[in-house]
Image (spheres, helix red, strand yellow):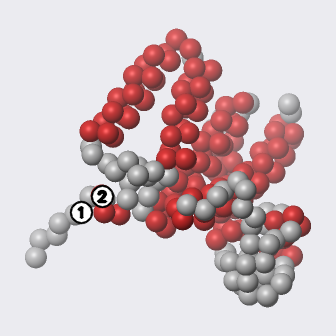
Amino acid sequence: MGLAATWAGISCFSVLAESFIGTLVQRLPSGANVVVSRSVCPACRHNLTAIELVPLLSWACLRGRCRWCHKPISLFYPAIELAALGVALWASSAVSGWILWATCIYGWTLLGLAVVDWRHYLLPDALTLFLIPAGLAVAWAIDPAVLAEHVIGSVSGFRARSLWNFPRSGTISSPEHRPCIATAP
């Protein structure tokens, strides 16, 4: 695959992937179904059509407003899609080939986790636990000889997390278990 084809694929896929991550960020913390539920306008709850879901383009064409109720649509949606493109640009400056795709997927997942953590102070298992087998698979593909070291590191990290006494309610962290920093009077 040539450089231009790789760039076109990464650029298109990054906006689509982050559109999906934007959906995850909105729905996972509330427990809403991510795959089956239709996207709706946050103001009027009208089901959005496929043409209204084209990343960046539909937001720009509708001038950041719902087609049906004309209420403003948050800048969150185009911002997260542009951030995904930024992740792809950053990854492509460091790696190429199939590792570029793996790096982008890792970066997009971390971007989604960062936004969920920033907004809700939690890290959904649906996103965090995916990174363990994905990271091990990439490590094995890069250098199978050191897979055992990566497995030991993953198991040790997961075990340390359980010893740290984090809650096991579908999230790895939550506001009531965040460390407090005491300040002197």
Secondary structure found at label 1: loop
- Which mark is drawn over residue 112? none
Q: Quadrant of residue 36?
A: bottom right
Instruction: Identify which residue, 116 or 28, lies in the foreground.
Output: 28
Locate the N terminus by quadrant: top right
Label 1 environment density (alpha carbons within 10 Å; few <14, some 14–19, many ≥20): few
Q: Is residue 150 above or below residue 167?
A: above
Q: Is residue 163 left or right of residue 85?
A: left
Label 2 environment density (alpha carbons within 10 Å; few <14, some 14–19, many ≥20): few
Secondary structure found at label 2: helix
Is residue 84 in sight in this rendering? yes
- Which mark is drawn over residue 177? 2
Is residue 57 in sight in this rendering? no
Q: x, y percentage for residue 156?
A: 35, 29
User: What amino acid type is highlighted by mark number 1?
Assistant: Cys
Q: x, y percentage for residue 119?
A: 49, 67
Q: Is residue 25 above or below residue 44?
A: above
- The residue identified by callout 1 is 180
Locate the C terminus by quadrant: bottom left
Task: Say which residue appears at 37% left-offset and 59% top-offset.
Answer: 174
User: What amino acid type is highlighted by mark number 2?
Assistant: His
